[in-house]
Image: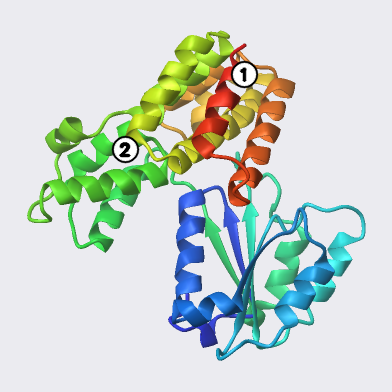
Amino acid sequence: MLPETIKDLPVVTILHGDDDYAIGSAINKITALMGDPSIADLNIARMDGATVSLDDVKSNISTMPFLAERRLVVLTHPLNRGEGYKDKLLGLLNTLPDSAALLLVLDDSFERKDWKTINKSHWLRNWSQAEKTRVLWLTCQLPSGDQMAAWIMNYAKSLQGRFDPHGASELAAHVGSDTRMAAIEVEKLLTYVDYKRPVDADDVNLLTTSISTVSIFDMVDAVAQQNSRKAIHLLHNLLEQQEPAGLFFMIVRQFRLLIQARELLDEGGGADQIERDMRQHPFVAKKLAEQARRFSMPQLEQVYRRLFEMDEAMKTSQAALDLSMDMFIASLAR
């Protein structure tokens, strides 16, 4: 639970998990605690740990806040460095001034009973447990297939709207565990009913398409079949219905799921194990198994590296995202 004021925010806040939407929402809430945006922007820094040195991070966060109580540094990819980095990072974490608020963003994937990278025995978890008064750890995990309907109903309630159980289940079948897409669809459906009655299954079927599941699978299938014309056509159809940034995150998530599914297949598992271990809807688990078999692990890892490079270019405004996705899909489908 986040505090209500920036003064009450611990020196270190850790956002960890695979729910990009929840992580983004938490970052927005924390930055909003900084107050007046015209002053807050002078006291907020966003840094990528994969490219900046810890000396740069330390220098930035040690700067005294300007006309504000705290200085906030949002550090993504804080663990993506080589030997000796752990001790340097611990040294920074243990010497942060009270005027600092350091936000560490840790992307991870949940596999079977634990997280792939920041597992139960990870040194950062041990450190955070020993420094409880100085650290707030927020786990942002995607809901499993059977939890998604409850997530939808709770999110609608937070917006002062309502979903009936059948409507929530129907929307969950459309969006899978994609919370970003679910949030968009919930807001659209609540607007449709003017917040005056619960959204039901008929409303969902009338207004919601399955683009977050079926069309993404179809596009990736076309890539695997090296059918560039079909893949580009499906991409353009998706771009007509989705903002480029939202679609890009859906594509990233799809290939992240395929890497996890490929690992399970390589260990002798199947759709049932994907459903159970990856906490997916049976339909999605079956499609993931079918699709993962069309790629080798080296192919999927190469694709994911390409997506990471696109994400970096997008953050630094080096390329138009829709054009980058066009070129990305075309090159994969050759």
Confirm whether residue 21 shows in the render.
yes
Image quadrant in which you'd find residue 172: top left
Q: Position of residue 9 (x, y in %)?
A: 55, 80
| Residue 25 higher or lower than 177, as above or below | below
Judge depth for marks 1 and 2 and give the one in front.
Answer: 1
The reply to whether callout 1 and callout 2 are in contact (CB within 8 Å) is: no
Q: Position of residue 254 (x, y in %)?
A: 52, 31
Return the residue nearer the eye: 329 or 6.
329
Q: Residue furthest right?
A: 84
Return the residue nearer the eye: 83 or 151.
83
Callout 1 crowding tier (Cα within 10 Å): few <14, some 14–19, many ≥20: some
- The amino acid type found where label 1 is placed reads Leu
Figure quadrant of the C terminus: top right
| Residue 271 higher or lower than 144, as above or below | above
Confirm whether residue 1 shows in the render.
no
Residue at figure coordinates x 25%, y 55% from the top left: 156
Residue at figure coordinates x 60%, y 88% from the top left: 66
Query: Which of pointers 1 and 2 lies earlier in the amino acid sequence?
Result: 2
Separation (CA) of disc 1 from disc 2: 30 Å
The residue pinned by badge 2 equals 172
Horizontal side of 297 relative to 21 (left or right) equals right
- The amino acid type found where label 2 is placed reads Ala
Q: Position of residue 133 (x, y in %)?
A: 63, 82
Image quadrant in which you'd find residue 111: top right
Dot 2: element: helix
Dot 1: element: helix
Tell me the tag on residue 118: none
The residue pinned by badge 1 equals 332
| Residue 64 higher or lower than 172, as above or below | below
